[in-house]
C-alpha cells in the first residue's frame, strides 16, 4: 500500500523519472505517456 502523506524529499526520490524511463515514455503516444509514467513509478514502489 502506498503512503498517503509524502514529504518533498520522498516525492523527488520516488517519483522523478530517470533518463532510461523517459526513453520508454517518449515511445508512447499522446495521453498514453502520462498513464505509462504513472504506472511505471507506481509498480516500482509496490
Image (spheres, rainbow, N blue to C red):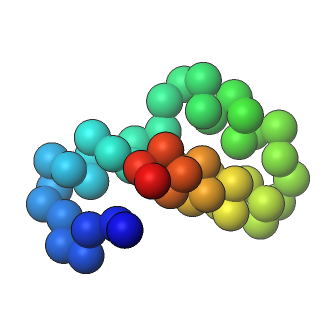
**Percent position (x, y) of residue 13?**
27, 40
Splitting the image into 4 quarters, where does residue 27 fall? top right
Quick check: 21 left or right of 17? right
- Left or right: residue 34 compared with residue 30: left
Residue 12: where, in percent of width, then height?
A: 27, 46
Q: Is residue 28 above or below residue 32?
A: above
Tell me the residue at 49%/30% (across/down).
18
Viewport quadrant of the N terminus: bottom left
Q: How many marks?
A: 0
Compared to residue 36, the image places residue 2 above or below, namely below
Vertical order, 28 against 17 (above or below): below
At a point 25% along the width and 76% down the height, the residue shown is 4
| Residue 14 position in % (x across, y down) | 33, 45
Looking at the image, residue 42 sits to the left or right of residue 25; the answer is left
Along the line of sight, which residue is nearer the eye, 24 or 42?
Answer: 42
Residue drawn at the location 60% of the way across and 48% of the way down: 40
Image-quadrant location for residue 7? bottom left
Q: Is residue 31 above or below residue 22?
A: below
Amino acid at each position: 500500500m502506498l503512503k498517503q502523506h509524502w514529504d518533498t524529499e520522498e516525492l523527488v526520490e520516488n517519483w522523478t523519472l530517470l533518463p532510461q524511463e523517459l526513453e520508454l515514455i517518449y515511445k508512447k503516444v499522446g495521453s498514453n505517456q502520462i498513464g505509462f509514467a504513472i504506472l511505471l513509478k507506481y509498480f516500482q514502489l509496490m
